Amino acid sequence: MRSDFVQTKKISVLKFPLITKGHFLYAVDYGVFWKINTPFEAELVITSAGYFERKNGELLAATPAGAKPQIQSYLNAFLLLFSGKFEELQQLFSLSFLQSGNDWVVGLTPKGRLAKVIQNIQLSGSLAARVKNLSIKEVNGDFTKIQFHDTAYSTQSLSEADQKLFQ
Amino acid sequence: MTQHTPPNHSAKLIKNSSNNFPLQNILPVFWLSIVVVLLVATAFIFNRGLQIETNLLSLLPSFKEEVLLQKSAERFSSQVSRRLFFLVGNKSEKDSRSAALKLAELFENSAHFSSVQVEVKSQQLKAWYDFYFPYRYQIMSAEMRNLLNQQDAAEQLLLGLQKQLYSPLPLYSAQLLIDDPLLFFPAFLASLPKPPGKLEVIDGMLTVRENGMNYILVNVSLSDDPFKISLQPQISGQITQALAAVESEISGTSILSSGVFRFVAAASAEAQREVSSIGLGSLIGIFILMLLTFRSPRQILVAVLPIVIGILAAFTVSSFVFPKLHLLTLVFGASLIGVSIDYAFHYLVKHRMSTADWNGWLGLKAVFSAVTMGLITSILGYAGFYLTPFPALQQIAVFSSVGLLAAYGTVVCWFPVLMKHPPEAVASKPLTMLPVSWFLSFFNKLPRQSFMTVGMLLVGMGCVFSLLSVQYNDDIRALENLSPELKSEEEKIRSLTGGLDISRFIVVRGGTVEELLQRQEKATLLLKNYAESNILPSGDSQIYFQSLAPFLVSRKTQAENLGLSKNVFIDGTQKITQGLAELGFEADSGKRLIAEVSQAQQSFTVKQWLESPVSEALRHLWLGQIDSEYVSLIMLSNGHDPEEISSMFQQLSGVEYINQLERFSALFKLYREETTRFVALAYGIVFMFLLWKYRFRKAVIILLPPALATLLTFSIMTISGQSLNIFNIVAALLILGIGVDYTIFFAESNNEAEATGLAIMLSAFTTLLSFGLLFLSQTPALASIGLTITLGISFSLLLSPLARTN
């Protein structure tokens, strides 16, 4: 799954929302490659192993999954959201499903340790271009909304250049 | 022999012109009062609680110039030795967690365990915040310092904040953003060293996963000294019970355990078993021999009496002199049975071979000189140990000297009263006399003594020649007896938790706390660079170390850091205020930062840190004040190269790398050499004493058999490929003490070679029985002593008739 995204993050103690634009790539066996274009440039790689910041292929900072348990469970959940593995999702969340015509909404309320950080997650889309919106509401009142557009799906394996993004 | 003994006997008595032994009316009562005092003292000691030292490392002497290092190592090991680790494993994460909680609960319900830790307290992050947050501008990571030193520090701080804010991942708490918008505190937390190994905190528990198993670490401290021998069986039992209870209650659970206590308890249980089996074997052997010789159980009881009193006295007096008796001292105590019975046998054989006109005090008179000479030479031989700097040797010196003296006292003061009546089996030779007669008649057929002496000297020279290729092994690890099962469990735990090396570490010292902290920072910086230059293919460093430097920052560094923060905030006021406002922070955020950094307060003290929960996992590194200096430790993982590390700190004063193993092996070598010289000295002292008492030729013939026996023993061990260590050399001194007894008894036998021969053979066999069993010991040090003594005493016995008078 490749897409452009607009992330709107409302942090409770800040006066106005922070808006990020960039490019998004998800591949089942690799993870998420998150490229921020504005307001500054940054490359983030999110895999089950951790959260890494890179610049032109060089590692700038790494937060290994093991370092903080909350990060680890969050990363797992974040990656699962795009995987469509409902059985595994059901272990972490109680799910609710709504559909009207081509549009659908999945509501996820976390169970267990994730509930300490996240209040709920909403994933919505239409059958044609599957995921359109992802909203995450945190327990502390922060709210993140990610809109995906120009999404393309492919069942082919990653090109070598793309594979390098995850290394 | 028996027929013409009485006339000789009485002739000698008449020559002495007195039918009484000096003070014969007072001696028994005098000794009774001493024994009563002894019993009271023993009761007092048992009441006080026994402490037996099993740690071989405690045998090491202390050097003046090394006192501080020695004390540091001791203080550290007394902390570390109380710790116990359990890894509670189960395939199911949930079950492993409940099993760990169950185990912790069982330990908490027992008085023997304190500070049972299974959950990393959830408030800990809050504790860190409460403790360190006020100092966020003065206590910071090296990376933050580098950043602050750069021209565009303000921009970089803002960029860092932006990245965090714009990240798709959840953020820090809202309050933190307001209080610390430039994220100094999170940067400090993130820079702190991660726990070693594969451990991670999952839902408040230290967890490690391996091969589908989920392990939870349970950390326990013992309430008491693990070396307290009286508590060991009880504590071991409780641990075993607790593990079994948890394993059976939650199926599929397997628990690994480690800790100094596990080894100590296993070693002392083994040693206790050995001591009692050696003691028992020795007593059974003695019993059979005596039954064959005396045909009466009464003599057996009488003969055992000096041993009991001797050991009681040895134990009690040593316990008063030394704070903790070493296990080796006690094992020598069990062996002392074989030595102190010499005097009893000498008297009892005299009694056995006498006739109806037996008088107990006159009998004593006949053996008094031999027994007294034997005692003096033995004590001269053993007491010299007291001059060595080895604590255990000093203990053995006191233990054996006191034991021998008490056994001697019992024989001299009580035996004439206990053996008042003539023997019942007068005129019948004891069964055990048979081999003695054969043995002595064999000696009578040998060529002249001078010829023998030359032959012995030749054999001795041959031995010396073979000893040119002698091998020594001073590695302390070869001497310890570590249970293999426990060792493999410990290695497993170590590989999973990344345990640190507790025998090789870095000692940092300073005249003031500040000096110590500054040195600690320098040393830590060197180590950090070294660790970063030794990266494994996996990306982890080969070297892991644990230092207090990031947690306890020197005032000097704090002042520098604060100055840096101030400069950046003042120079970048404009940028920071604007940048924060653009991100949506309150308009006064920038000004508030400058106000905060200017008001920064004097930092916390080490004492406050030690009292705070944040120091919980690291307190063992702070040793505090030792003598006039302050000391802390830096611990290292196993994989380091000792040479590189020690050379790294040569330029830094007050920082020393301690390699306990190597240091101990070096000391063992030094003191093996020292003790070897001491054996030579002991021979010299005994020879001087003999010269004062006898003529030169006789003195030589008394000393030659034990000397040759020792040479032959080491020669045989060398030829059979065994390497020697300090304990074999110590055994050589015992051979001297015991061997000289035999030759003196013969020299003092006044033509009663057969009776003396019987007494000597009885005592030699009891010694062999006790030491022979000793070399079945699982502790290599004891087994080695056993072998040396067995060979040495056998040769001493075989050569001893050379000193007999014809």
Image (tube, grey):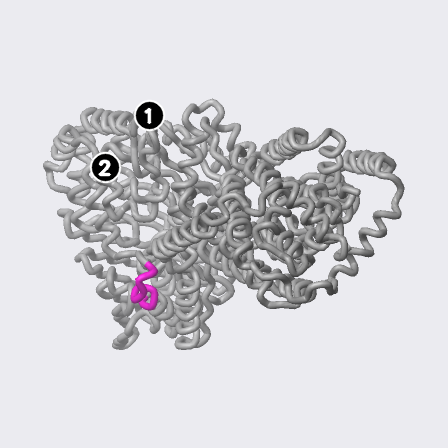
Q: Nearer the viewer, residue B201 or B333?
A: B333
Q: Is residue B350 above or below residue B741?
A: below
**Any part of residue A152 in sight:** yes
Among numbered discs 2 and 1, the one appearing first in the sequence: 2
Query: x, y (%) of residue B268?
Result: 50, 57
Cα–Cα span, label 2 and label 1: 28 Å
Q: Quadrant of the N terminus of chain B?
A: bottom right
User: Numbered disc 1: what chain?
Assistant: B
Query: x, y (%) of residue B344?
Result: 60, 54
**Any part of residue A166 in sight:** no
Q: Residues within 10 Å of mark 2 (few under 14, many from 20)?
A: many
Please state which amino acid type lies under the numbered disc 2: Arg
Q: Residues within 10 Å of mark 1 (few under 14, many from 20)?
A: few
User: Numbered disc 2: what chain?
Assistant: B
Q: Magenta span covers which residues?
A: B105-113
Label 1 residue SS: loop
Asked if the stretch drawn in magenta spans residue B109, the answer is yes
Q: Nearer the viewer, residue B39 or B345?
A: B345
Read off the residue under disc 1.
B511
Q: Is residue A99 above or below residue A8?
A: below
